[in-house]
Image (cartoon, rainbow, N blue to C red):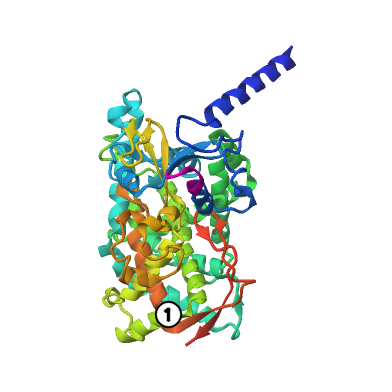
Amino acid sequence: MIFILFVITGVLLVVYLKQKYFTLHGYVPGLAPQFLFGNLLQSGFFNGNSPPMILSTFQKRFGDVFQFWFGPSRFIVINNITDVEHVLTHRNIYDQGDIFIEKFSINYSQSLISTKGLSQIASLWPFLCKIISLGIQFKRHSSIVSPLFRRSKVISHFDLIIGCTDKLLTKWRKTEAKTIHVDIVSQCHNLVLAIFGFIAFDYDLETLDDGDNELTLALRTIINSIMTILALPRILAKAYVTLSYRQRQARNTIERYIYRMIEHEQATAQGKHTSLIASLVHSLRMNEHLEATEDIDEDKRGLSRNEVVDEMVAFLIAGFESTSSTLVWFIHLVSKHAQVQQKIKAELIAQDCLYHLSSDRLDSLVYLNCVINEVLRFIPPATGTIRTLTRDDCLPATNVQLVRGDSVLIPFHSLAHDPRYWSVDPNLFYPERFLGEDQNHHPYALIPFGGGHRQCIGQDLARFELKVIVGRLMQKVTFDDAGPEVNAGGHSMGLAILPKHIGVSIEFD
């Protein structure tokens, strides 16, 4: 009897999960999802097809608006640029994607990415208390973190970025001539992580001294698991994170580094909130003081120790992956287009920057800026951005009706490669497009860091880092294509899109 009840319960559970998570909803076109896998098997995801390529294929088949199931998560994918602009400019209707709350909170529930704004209050009255709590949490985190990533703060890090880049150049100079570098991905990761360690945490993470140090390996473990976590139902994702020895070990390693950085900051703090960790530690002290005096006014609270740790983990991962992926793609793409490197070097000479690069002269490097924009357009660092509806809405261009709770996905790669929005063939790597026909492209055709009120908080830092690093590299070296076997490109998916195969030789000028 017990066995029969167990079987019946199992069947009912499968039927419930199939109906709730794996059934095509409404009138929006799409492929009927398969149990557990959604559209991942049908789209070839497990055979190496990357999400940008998959979404482009679905757009050709189903049109500008379609359903796509990433495992149990259902998205309405939007490709019409008028609809995209509508979504990103109506924050009172489209808030932070619920998937960020549900999945990213498994690893770092107290970070900025796992919080919502206050725009849900009006339409979700039954959950008012929870929403207010999330809104206040977002406000507290944002007020502490956001000012540190403004351009006025970012440009002060010029010499630091140059110094770290020079350290990598010194390592390259010690290698034999015509060495084929097939570890460009890890080298770029280590460079960007070293820079971010100094900028955000005023701490030497030593990644340029030891490319395989335990922090780097731990971060890669966490990053490599993100796609798995996204593809699983939350309960299974949480079990995976909790039960996996590698996940627990990686998290413990990262937290050990973070506590070391917090202790270092507490021991050396000078009262100046010039770095992320300085502001976080100041907020932590303020919170501890308020708790000691039993003043629990939410508006006055600082961040708790758990919030500080989760925020640092989230920023470490973001700083580790997204900027470095664009740098990797820059090296790969310019190794295939020698004329682009020649034009950058010619501009450095023309602007008297070949030997004397400075933060003041960066703005004069117009072509270099075009190259960086083209790399970001050609291969955006992320698949897209997600918003969840707080109330029913109708998309203005396609007239598709959406309901509260729907999650919409805006695919960066599809917009950046849609010939409707670009005058020059968008499948060409052609930086000059931003000097001519595509100089005045639609602003929402190129949104590599997202748009609206939840766009990437660190985009000014990322762009500045890229421009300084690339400018310095082009002062010193030329990247040569090592041939189709080792430098074939392709897509390898993690948190960011990386080339599956990259191999270049580095020639000092």
Asked if residue 373 lies left or right of residue 320, the reply is left
- Residue at (55, 70) in percent of width and height: 184
Magenta region, main secondary structure: helix
Which one is in front, 313 or 260?
Answer: 313
Q: Nearer the viewer, residue 131 or 267?
A: 131
Q: Is residue 213 magenta?
A: no
Q: Left or right: 323 with respect to 90? A: right
Residue 283 lies, in percent from the top left, at 32, 48
Q: Position of residue 87 (x, y in %)?
A: 33, 43
Residue displayed at 49% across by 71% down: 333
Residue sitting nearer the eye, 383 or 8: 383
Q: Residue at x 45, y 44 (%)?
A: 63
**The N terminus sits in image quarter:** top right
Q: Position of residue 336 (x, y in %)?
A: 52, 75
- Identify the residue position indicated by label 1 in the image: 474
Q: Which residue ends up furthest to the top in the rendered image? A: 1
As drawn, 216 above or below 9 = below
Q: Quadrant of residue 467?
A: bottom left
Q: Position of residue 54 (x, y in %)?
A: 53, 50
Q: Is residue 7 left or right of residue 89?
A: right
Q: Determine if residue 36 is in view.
A: yes
The residue range painted magenta reads 59-64
**Helix, strand or loop for disc 1:** helix
